[in-house]
């Protein structure tokens, strides 16, 4: 299966910018199926973690108010070119995915 | 007879909807969810969300936090929001939408190496203030910006 994550990390003047896109429905749980009127169960990412060399750079806790196919970006110092950063996410149904990127 | 059949159908439909909701609730893996601040995300006011997330609600307004978001968002389902702060030792940044059904949209915990910047895209139900609450050096700071929403992004 193709990875749900697209991640880029770019270093410039000692600061690394990490950008990521995750493919996920981010269902709020308040919407209803237009035909049946049944509520669509909530299905959203709850936790995103970005790690570098075994230590956590950033942890994000997300609620259902984060947009569908979420985008995330942040900056960090002390991550050099050629090193790898790893992003992983977990959703409220226990699904997860992980992907690594090399800093350029 | 057909009338009874309608009633029966309606009842079974209602029953199955409840069943789906219950099983969805049961599916939550507690071990995974343990770290997720459920109470803070379930809070129904911005102040309550801050209190439940940080255990304190005395966020001081700060000019050192900039929120970058559109003045008018045409589509409330996708509102790009960036928060940048020049405060030192930023531990956490939370993005809160005052008038969303559950105001807390996202919270980011930053390592010491990370800089005071996060960017993401959020949903907004209607025109509201977007709050950024930053925890730096153990203290809370906040800033807000109004975003007008033409089409809401939370309903169906």
Image (spheres, helix red, strand yellow):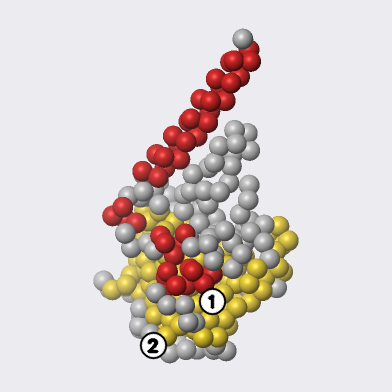
Coordinates of residue B2 in the picture (x, y in percent): 63, 12
Q: Chain of mark 1?
A: B
Q: Disc 2 versus disc 1: distance between alpha carbons?
A: 16 Å
Name the one closer to the observer, B44 or B137.
B44
Q: Residue A99: which disc?
A: none
> Which residue is tagged 1?
B132
Left or right: where does residue A55 sit relative to residue A99? left
Q: Chain of mark 2?
A: B
Q: Is residue A92 above or below residue B149?
A: above
Mark 2 vs mark 1: same chain?
Answer: yes
Q: Is residue B78 above or below residue B96?
A: above
The secondary structure type at the circle numbered 2 is loop
At x 37%, y 62%, the residue is: B36
Residue A102, visible in the rendered structure: no
Report which quarter residue B138 is drawn in.
bottom left
How packed is label 2: few (under 14 Cα within 10 Å), some, or many (20 or more)? few
Left or right: where does residue B9 sit relative to residue A61? right
At x 51%, y 86%, the residue is: B60
Residue B21, visible in the rendered structure: yes
User: Which label's residue is closer to the chain start, 2 or 1?
Assistant: 1
Report which quarter residue A51 is drawn in.
bottom left
The secondary structure type at the circle numbered 1 is strand
Name the one closer to the observer, A74 or B138.
B138
Looking at the rendered image, the quarter that the C terminus of chain A falls into is: bottom left
At x 53%, y 76%, the residue is: B132
Coordinates of residue A76 in the picture (x, y in percent): 41, 80
At x 48%, y 48%, the residue is: A42
> Which residue is tagged 2?
B137
Instruction: Give the residue furthest to the left.
Output: A54
């Amino acid at each position: 299966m193709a990875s749900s994550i697209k991640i880029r990390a770019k270093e410039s003047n000692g600061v690394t910018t990490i950008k990521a896109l995750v493919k996920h429905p981010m269902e709020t749980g308040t919407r209803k199926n237009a035909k049946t009127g049944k509520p669509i169960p909530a299905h959203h990412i709850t936790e995103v973690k970005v790690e570098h060399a075994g230590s956590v750079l950033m942890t994000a806790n997300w609620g259902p108010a984060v947009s569908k196919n979420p985008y995330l970006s942040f900056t960090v110092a002390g991550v050099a070119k050629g090193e790898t950063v790893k992003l992983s996410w977990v959703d409220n149904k226990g699904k997860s995915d992980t992907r690594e990127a090399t800093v350029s | 007879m057909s009338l009874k059949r309608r009633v029966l159908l309606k009842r079974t439909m209602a029953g199955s909807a409840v069943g789906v909701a219950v099983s969805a609730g049961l599916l939550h893996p507690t071990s995974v969810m343990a770290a997720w601040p459920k109470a803070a995300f379930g809070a129904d006011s911005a102040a309550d969300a801050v209190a439940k997330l940080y255990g304190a609600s005395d966020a001081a307004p700060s000019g050192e936090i900039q929120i970058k978001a559109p003045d008018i968002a045409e589509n409330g389902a996708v509102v790009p929001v960036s928060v940048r702060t020049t405060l030192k030792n930023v531990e956490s940044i939370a993005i809160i939408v005052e008038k969303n059904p559950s105001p807390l949209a996202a919270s980011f915990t930053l390592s010491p190496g990370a800089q005071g910047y996060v960017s993401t895209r959020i949903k907004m139900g209607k025109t509201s203030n977007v709050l950024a609450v930053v925890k730096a050096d153990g203290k809370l700071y906040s800033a807000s910006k109004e975003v007008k929403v033409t089409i809401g992004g939370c309903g169906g």
